[in-house]
Image (cartoon, rainbow, N blue to C red):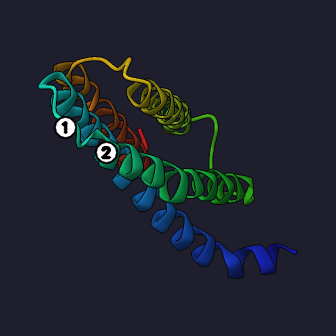
Amino acid sequence: MTDLLSMLYPYVKAFHVMAVISWMAGLFYLPRLFVYHAERSAQGHEPTASFVIMEQKLLRMIMNPAMIATWISGLCLVMTPGIVSWALIWPWTKAGCVLGMTWFHMWCARQRRLLEAGKGKDGRYYRMMNEVPTLLMMVIVLSVIVKF
């Protein structure tokens, strides 16, 4: 069994990296769409219907599957014997930030529904929130590469 795990590990890791890249692309882009959506709405412009469609498709067709793939492949990597030492700090910081990233994903889903209903926040708020996944990503990458 461990031979099979050793053989599959690089493929699962590669799939995990691809899933993370896809998820992060959505987490970076969706709040930018929120900024434009909120600002156009505040100016009284009507092309918000196209923003609703773009936000909906990005979340449902790219971000949700990418998040699920990230979680499944990440859990498979964590369960591979000898890969993670939970006595170190880095797996805990990464896990905390991944939970934070998942919270941010759910926050985006809620904000999308609020914007669609015309109850969203202003563009400045979404600009500030757009920095959250960047900060979490920095901690995750440093945790995994430096292994502090």
Give the residue at x 68% y 55%.
72
What is the three-letter code of the residue carrying label 2? Phe
User: Badge 2 is on which residue?
Assistant: 51
| Lateral position of residue 104 relative to residue 44, left or right | right
* Mark 1 crowd level (few <14, some 14–19, many ≥20, 10 Å Cα): some
Among the 4 quarters of the image, the one containing residue 92? top right
x, y percent for residue 76: 71, 59
What is the C-alpha distance between the residues marked 1 and 2?
8 Å
Give the residue at x 53% y 35%.
102
Question: As displayed, is residue 121 above or below residue 99?
Answer: above
* Mark 2 crowd level (few <14, some 14–19, many ≥20, 10 Å Cα): some
| Lateral position of residue 11 relative to residue 140, left or right | right
User: Do the CB atoms of the residues marked 1 and 2 lie less than 8 Å apart?
Assistant: yes
Q: Mark 1 vs mark 2: which is more N-terminal?
A: 1
Q: Secondary structure at mark 1?
A: helix
> Which numbered dot is residue 36?
1
Nearest the eye: 146 or 42? 42
